[in-house]
DNA sequence: GAGGAATATTCCTCTTTAGTTATATTTGAA
DNA sequence: TTCAAATATAACTAAAGAGGAATATTCCTC
């Protein structure tokens, strides 16, 4: 999870992932579409690859990069344990805290 | 999304978020449980707060930090567009690419 | 096998950022 | 009103990492 998030945190890498969402692409294509220089694209792809977010297939001269499923499943599973926070019911905790604070303030008035 | 991921990418901040998953905590409690020094905890919480991942409530001396729902919903929505990648069907794309490569190799043999 | 295209790698610089220490601020309690 | 606890902030240092230019590598084509 740590490595996955770290890889995605860099803006250009996030853009690369967004690009690959629609299908595999070549290093050159990625660099072109994002206005990156080739080494920059290569390096970011390297990071994504080390993080397991992307896989690479050599075809002759070219290297085709493609998204892997696992990291996304990982994020999905991780999010699962925060499901209760996304529920309406959770927001009440804020109210609870604010009430608690308001109560304290009122205590002072006494 | 960019700021959310960036905030979560730092290991200690991820740990803080994990901690807060089970309920609101004080700066001191967070620092203790994670073995962080107080300023360190404060700063990470500041980053999380700027990123909207966390909210703060003052109670007397203390500041209580609590998770916000929105960023998690945001991640959830983002993940949604990668749903197709997590499906079995997607993995076939790898096969497709490997086939393509194998085909190329065979062409060479001719 | 020479040249060119696509990509990776190396080295360098610069910016960002995490950690640390010291200090300021706020608040409850004596 | 003074003291101590909880937290934030500032200043500094060090390390990580992104971008750029140059170079190495691989592979196709002629």
Image: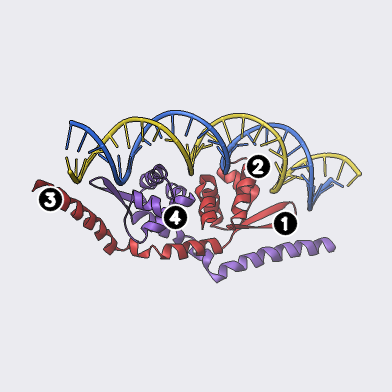
Chain colours: A purple, B red, C blue, D yellow
Q: Which residue is mark 3?
A: B107
Q: Which mark is residue A96?
A: none
Q: Dot 3 lies on which element?
A: helix
Task: Quadrant for the C terminus of chain A, please.
Answer: bottom right
Dot 2 falls on which chain? B
Tell me if label 1 and label 4 are in contact, CB under 8 Å: no
On the image, which quarter does residue C7 sit in? top left
Residue at the location (61% across, 68% down)? A92
Q: x and y percent of residue A51 in the render?
A: 38, 46
Tell me if label 4 and label 3 are in contact, CB under 8 Å: no
Q: x and y percent of residue A84 in the render?
A: 51, 65
How far, Cα to Cα, is label 1 from label 3? 73 Å
Q: Which mark is residue B39?
A: 2
How far, Cα to Cα, is label 2 from label 3? 64 Å
At label 2, counting other C-alpha atoms closer than 10 Å, the crowd grade (few under 14, some 14-19, many 20 or more) is few
Q: x and y percent of residue D8 in the render?
A: 70, 48
Residue at the location (15% across, 48% down)? B105
Tell me if label 4 and label 2 are in contact, CB under 8 Å: no
Q: Which residue is mark 1?
A: B59
Q: Which residue is mark 4?
A: A15
At label 1, counting other C-alpha atoms closer than 10 Å, the crowd grade (few under 14, some 14-19, many 20 or more) is some
Which of label 1 and label 4 is nearer to you? 4
The relative height of residue B24 versus residue C16 in the rendered view (above or below) is: below
């Amino acid at each position: 999870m740590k490595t996955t998030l770290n890889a995605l945190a860099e803006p250009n890498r996030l853009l690369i992932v967004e690009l690959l969402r629609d299908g595999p692409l070549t290093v050159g294509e990625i660099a072109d579409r994002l206005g990156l220089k080739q080494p920059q694209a290569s390096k970011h792809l390297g990071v994504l690859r080390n993080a397991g977010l992307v896989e690479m297939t050599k075809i002759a001269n070219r290297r085709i990069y493609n998204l892997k499923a696992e990291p996304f499943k990982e994020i999905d599973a991780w999010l699962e344990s925060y499901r209760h926070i996304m529920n309406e019911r959770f927001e009440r905790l804020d109210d609870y805290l604010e009430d608690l604070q308001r109560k304290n303030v009122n205590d002072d008035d006494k």
